Image (cartoon, rainbow, N blue to C red):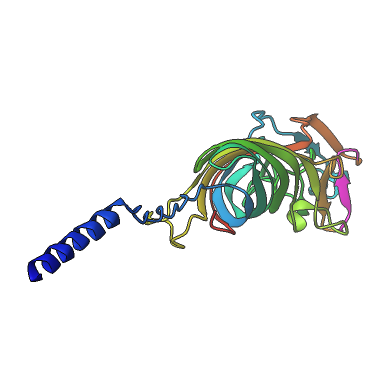
Amino acid sequence: MKKLLSAFAAFTALTAAASAADLPRRVAPPPVFTPVPVFTWTGFYAGFNAGYGFGTDDRRAGPVVAVGPATGLVAPGTSAVIAFGGRNSTDGFVGGGQIGYNYQFTPGSGIVVGIEADAQYVDFGRDRNRFVSTSPLAAQQVFNPNGLSGLDFFGTVRGRLGYAWDRTLVYATGGFAYGSGGGRDFGLPNRSTDDFQTGWTVGGGVEYALPTDSFLNFFKSNAVTLKVEGLYVNLDRGNGLNGAFAVNNAGAIITTTSPGVVVVNAGQTRRDTEFAVVRAGLNYKFGTY
């Protein structure tokens, strides 16, 4: 009897094991997919820049004016010839800041459009009124008869259109430009001390977004970008200072049409302030991706 019971128990155990083997196994859950973030240029940004600006007008002839005693600029019975240098030293340091917004149509690689505004300090026109004379002058101030060329600051409001290859953006840019020079060096006495100018600008550049692990990425984020940019700027100076020549010790304004003044050589008559800017910049884009 015991043998029979033992055989029955063994048979039952084998049957249970076989039935368990036939049951479907529990399927493990699939791994959670975490997409890799794709960089996009879309977003607001702000930053600063620095570079060098230089004049693009290659004409070098400066005006030459002869003056007599009737002007009050020379002693009675004498005369003088004043020659202005043709080069106005429209070159020097450029630096400032910018803000803007980009929109990228397709993250990763694709077309990027945007708008940017910047304001720049410039060190232009240091020698804009430099002249030589054949005799000492009795004058408080002497001006270039063709108008003055110099800037204290300028700025732009530009559109941007480019194409991005992941973190590299190549773009063209253009739009409105403005600028001004300040102080008595840029205006006549009892006149406005600023000569505000407006015009246009066009240029292009390349911008690169730093990887998170770059030692230059001090924010340790995907939001720091570096750019190199070139701009051509053309500002219309107008005719406000044309013909302005000097102010004598009596405070009278002498012009090229005053008695005793002879324009020997009108020199260059260009009215616009034209210059190019090459600069490097750093931006912080708000929003990591």
Residue 182, percent across and down?
A: 75, 56
Q: Observer-nearest residue: 212 or 7?
A: 7
Which quadrant is the N terminus positioned in? bottom left
Q: What residue lies at 79% left-to-right and 38% top-to-bottom? A: 146
253 left or right of 127 in image: right
Residue 262, percent across and down?
A: 84, 34
Residue 22, percent across and down?
A: 30, 51
Residue 78 visible in this rendered orientation of the protein: no
Q: Observer-nearest residue: 108 or 130?
A: 108
Residue 18, percent across and down?
A: 24, 54
Residue 173 visible in this rendered orientation of the protein: yes
261 left or right of 156 in image: right
40 left or right of 188 in image: left
Q: What residue lies at 71% left-to-right and 43% top-to-bottom? A: 158
Magenta-span inclusion, residue 255: yes
Q: Quadrant of residue 248?
A: bottom right
97 left or right of 5 in image: right
Q: What residue lies at 80% left-to-right and 41% top-to-bottom? A: 237
Q: Observer-nearest residue: 181 or 31?
A: 31
Give the magenta range: 251-257
Counting the numbered discs, the total is: 0
Q: Residue furthest bottom?
A: 2
Magenta-span inclusion, residue 254: yes
Q: Residue furthest front?
A: 1
Q: Quadrant of residue 97?
A: bottom right
Residue 59, compared with residue 196, is above or below; it is: above
Q: What residue lies at 8% left-to-right and 67% top-to-bottom? A: 3
Residue 122, compared with residue 131, is above or below; it is: below
